[in-house]
Image: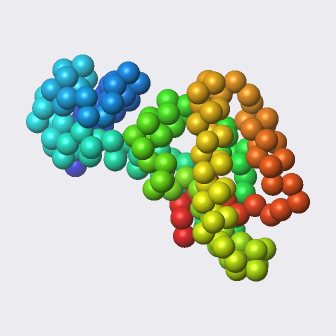
Amino acid sequence: MNTPNNKRKKESMERMEKVFVDLLQTRELAEIRVSELCKRAGVNRTTFYANYADIYGLADSIRDKLENNLSSLYQSEIAQGFNSNDYLKLFRHIRDNQIFYQTYFKLGYDDNYKIFTYDTELARRHFQNHFIEYHMEFFKSGITRIIKLWLQTGCRESPEDMYEIVKSEYQGREKFFSAEEET
């Protein structure tokens, strides 16, 4: 492969992603035009369409990038087949990548995101296999709202504070989620 062209392609994609994320801070997805994005990123429309089918394809690419980035934090756990429920790692990642998480939620990935995995086997044992879907939905909705609120305040509290908040809500219970891809 041609290394200078690969580097140029990567740089173009990074510029388009950055401009896209910047535009999303003040606009809705449907209001963003490829022509304006390309102009601001300093790339041709052909470059855009060589990498993305449309603006929604770019949005999906941003989502995938964040989910893969987050998943890599827990790769050793995934490989070893265990779930540490290390929320501190998650909250640090959110603090360090606030703009991407804000974008992620603004794009409406709340219901289908792959940030949390529900440990179904552990839940079956703990809740005697009753109403697992409801427990899962309750936790996912709660943690999502906590993260959104924290992002709205500019991550004013420390990741350690956020971890303690989540822990205090589930005192005496084993946790069923971690920040890794759903199994």
Image quadrant holding the C terminus, namely bottom right
Say above or below: 86 vs 147.
Answer: below
Instruction: State the image quarter where residue 146 is shown.
Output: top right
Q: Position of residue 27 (x, y in %)?
A: 34, 25
Foreground residue among 30 and 44:
30
Its colouring scheme is rainbow
Foreground residue among 87 and 137:
137
Q: Position of residue 99 (x, y in %)?
A: 49, 29
Say above or below: 130 vs 45.
Answer: below
Say above or below: 56 vs 96.
Answer: below
For the question of whether residue 151 can be seen, the reply is yes
Instruction: State the image quarter where residue 117 is shown.
Output: bottom right
Q: Position of residue 52 (x, y in %)?
A: 22, 44
Total numbered circles:
0
Q: Residue furthest right?
A: 172
User: Residue at image x 54%, y 64%?
Assistant: 182
User: Residue at image x 22%, y 49%?
Assistant: 1
Instruction: State the image quarter where residue 80 is shown.
Output: bottom right
Q: Is residue 166 left or right of residue 120?
A: right
Foreground residue among 40 and 170:
170
User: Residue at image x 61%, y 24%?
Assistant: 154
User: Residue at image x 25%, y 29%?
Assistant: 32
Q: Position of residue 109 (x, y in %)?
A: 44, 48
